[in-house]
Image: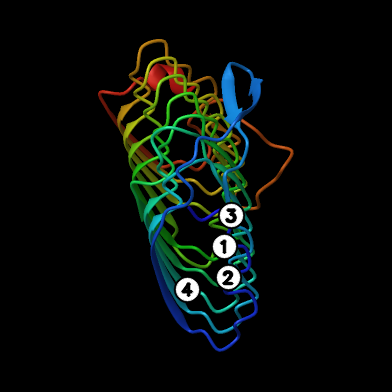
């Protein structure tokens, strides 16, 4: 099978729209690379690095059935595409046997506004580091049935996303982080202008780690949580940390609960006592 599509469209400055589908990757079983903190990591079996790199006129991109075999690695898959405004992901890196590793997969896309993703990053032993990094003008992101791999680490999935205070910014998480022994600590970090967070069936797996799930989301105002953190032995220490503090985003402030500028918190069949 395919082992690399590195730089497949790198520097294609005339490309304006693209749809990629059914690029699955090698089916060969990769060798075990390491065991860390109870999780297994596998050597990379297929590389998806710099696939869209400096595509200055790309405006929309749809990815379907990408990297669903083996142990794919995505490094700066999309990097510095300044005109990209719409991104859609479906069944990306959702292999069911070996883990996916990402590092800044979607990086420095300064004008991305809308991102919808579904059925992605659900394989076991998945490691998503800075999956979404510096996407400051995203205003709407809907994530459905994603990040559900057992024994996976999803920290810093969102980093410097939702940073434009002149618009209303909303993140919807539906059926996410449901794997057994999932580590979703520090998942949403420095999303300073995120206004609305809606979570449905999040962190329902056994031994889910959800401590400080959001950090430094200073503009957070409205939270709706339904069936969040209900898995056996789930941990939700300081779930909202440095959240809704002040409109001037004072980095020296912090709190441990739901005070500050969070105007509305609606919980239904969740564990709100653990949010603090």
State the mark number for residue 5: 1
Distance from disc 4 to disc 3, alpha carbons, whole Å, reads: 16 Å
Q: Nearer the viewer, residue 28 or 235?
A: 28
Q: Position of residue 94 (x, y in %)?
A: 40, 43
Distance from disc 2 to disc 4, alpha carbons, whole Å, reads: 20 Å
Q: Tell me the SS state at disc 1.
A: loop
- The residue where tag 4 is placed is 85
The part of the image, by quadrant, that contains residue 122 is top left
- Examine the rendered structure and indicate whether residue 151 appears above or below residue 105: above
Give whichever of discs 1 and 4 has the lower sequence position.
1
Of badges 1 and 3, the one in the foreground is 1
Display coloring: rainbow
- Examine the rendered structure and indicate whether residue 132 appears above or below residue 43: below
Of badges 4 and 3, the one in the foreground is 3
State the mark number for residue 8: 2
Give whichever of discs 3 and 2 has the lower sequence position.
2
Q: Residue at x 60, y 31 (%)?
A: 31
- The residue where tag 3 is placed is 105
Label 3 with label 2: CB-CB less than 8 Å:
no
Label 1 with label 3: CB-CB less than 8 Å:
no
Distance from disc 1 to disc 3, alpha carbons, whole Å, reads: 14 Å
Distance from disc 1 to disc 2, alpha carbons, whole Å, reads: 6 Å
Give whichever of discs 4 and 3 has the lower sequence position.
4
Neighbours of disc 3 within 10 Å: few (<14), some (14-19), many (20+): many
Distance from disc 1 to disc 4, alpha carbons, whole Å, reads: 23 Å
Of badges 1 and 4, the one in the foreground is 1
Q: Residue at x 50, y 33 (%)?
A: 259
Of badges 2 and 4, the one in the foreground is 2
Give whichever of discs 1 and 3 has the lower sequence position.
1
- Examine the rendered structure and indicate whether residue 266 appears above or below residue 81: above
């Amino acid at each position: 099978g395919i082992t690399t599509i590195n730089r497949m469209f790198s520097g294609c400055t005339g490309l304006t729209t693209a749809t990629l589908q059914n690029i699955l990757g090698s089916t060969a079983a990769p060798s075990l690379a390491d065991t860390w903190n109870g999780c297994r990591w596998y050597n990379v079996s297929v590389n998806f690095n710099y696939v869209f790199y400096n595509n200055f006129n790309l405006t929309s991109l749809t990815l379907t059935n990408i990297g669903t075999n083996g142990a794919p690695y995505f490094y700066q898959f999309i990097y510095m595409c300044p005109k990209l405004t719409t991104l859609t992901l479906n069944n990306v890196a959702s292999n069911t046997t070996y883990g996916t590793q990402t590092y800044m997969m979607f990086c420095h896309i300064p004008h991305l506004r809308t991102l919808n993703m579904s059925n992605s990053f659900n394989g076991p032993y998945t490691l998503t580091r800075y999956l979404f990094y510096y996407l400051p003008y995203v205003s709407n992101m809907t994530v459905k049935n994603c990040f559900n791999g057992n024994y996976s680490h999803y920290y810093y999935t969102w980093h410097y996303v939702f940073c434009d205070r002149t618009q209303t910014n909303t993140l919807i998480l539906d059926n996410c982080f449901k794997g057994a022994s999932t580590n979703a600590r520090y998942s949403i970090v420095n999303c300073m202008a995120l206004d609305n967070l809606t979570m449905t069936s999040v962190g329902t797996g056994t031994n889910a780690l959800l401590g400080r799930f959001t950090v430094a989301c200073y503009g957070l105002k409205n939270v709706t949580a339904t069936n969040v953190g209900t898995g056996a032995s789930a941990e939700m220490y300081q779930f909202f940390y440095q959240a809704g503090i002040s409109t001037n985003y004072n980095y020296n402030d912090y709190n441990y609960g739901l005070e500050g500028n969070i105007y509305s918190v609606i919980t239904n069949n969740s564990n709100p006592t653990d949010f603090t």
